[in-house]
Amino acid sequence: MRQDDFNNLLAKLRPAIGEIADTLWLTSLLDPTQQKNAHAVAQALSAELLGQGYIGEHILLEPPPNENAAGEYKLGHVVYAGKPVCPFALREEDLPQHIAILGRSGAGKTNVGYLVVSNLLEKRKPFMVLDWRRNYRHLARRSEAKDLIVLPVGEPESLCFNPLDPPPGLTANQRDAYLRDVISVLCTTYLPGHHLLSTRGVEY
């Protein structure tokens, strides 16, 4: 085994075996007669703990440092070599950023969403969920959700508005500008809308 490969293997093993990885590295470096033994031990530990045997290596990402995974909104644990390494959470400064929760069907995307919303409820942070499949309604029964408002889609009490009916109190110019903006957005959403606007003499 080349020394570079050995070092990379120890880097993957270190989260699982701790200072033993340092001992193997020093043994290989300081005692050439024990180098093969150190390499063999590392390979055996890799096969047992990381599942990397003679068939071939699979992609194994090293866990992040504990301080990088820490935060106020706990979601779970970082698991490495089949064991939890440290808690994984979102930080306060992560909330305003875009987050994509990706995965195959049944991988737990909705469950992650529950955890995020549950944290927001406990810390009384405002949020809005567009829940077309009605997966989140049960959260309204929680004690922390007494101020939660559920607006059912398609029912009389739902949140609805007419985009062509401007808010009251606008001047004639403001009303015209409002309607022009609404029509512009609706028409430019589709390619034929550009032609429609141009033939009607509307600037956008």
Image (tube, rainbow, N blue to C red):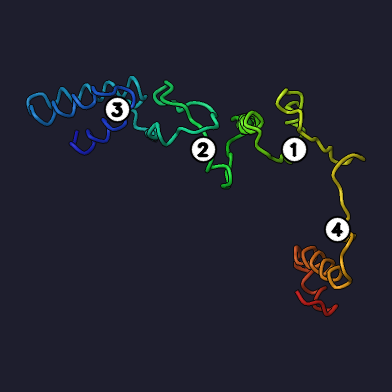
CA distance separating discs 1 and 2: 24 Å
Q: Identify the residue shown where x is 43% and y is 22%.
A: 84
Q: Which residue is mark 1?
A: 131
Q: Residue 93: x, y in percent?
A: 52, 43
State the residue position of label 3: 14
The reply to whether the C-beta atoms of the residues labelled 1 and 2 are less than 8 Å apart is: no
Relative vertical location of residue 158 with respect to residue 24 in this rendering, above or below: below
Amino acid marked by disc 4: Pro
Badge 1 density bin: few <14, some 14–19, many ≥20, Cα 10 Å: few
Label 3 close to label 1 by CB (< 8 Å) = no
Return the x and y of residue 140 as percentages of the image width and height.
Answer: 76, 28
The mark found on residue 163 in the picture is 4
The picture places residue 14, in percent across and down from the top left corner, at: 29, 27
Question: Which of the two discs, 4 and 1, labels the residue nearer the N terminus?
Answer: 1
Cα–Cα span, label 3 and label 1: 43 Å
Q: Is 203 in front, or is 133?
A: 203
Q: Secondary structure at mark 3?
A: helix
Q: Nearer the viewer, mark 3 or mark 2?
A: 2
- Name the amino acid, label 1: Asp
* Element class at badge 2: loop
Q: Which residue is mark 2?
A: 91
Q: Which residue: 23% across, 36% down? A: 5
Which amino acid type is marked by label 2?
A: Arg
Sequence-wise, the earlier of marks 1 and 2 is 2
Precedes in sequence: disc 3 or disc 2: 3
- Give the label on residue 97, or none: none
Relative placement, left or right, of 40 versus 119 is left
Whether residue 64 sits left or right of residue 187 in the image: it is left
Number of marks in the rendered image? 4
**Residue displayed at 12% across by 31% down:** 29
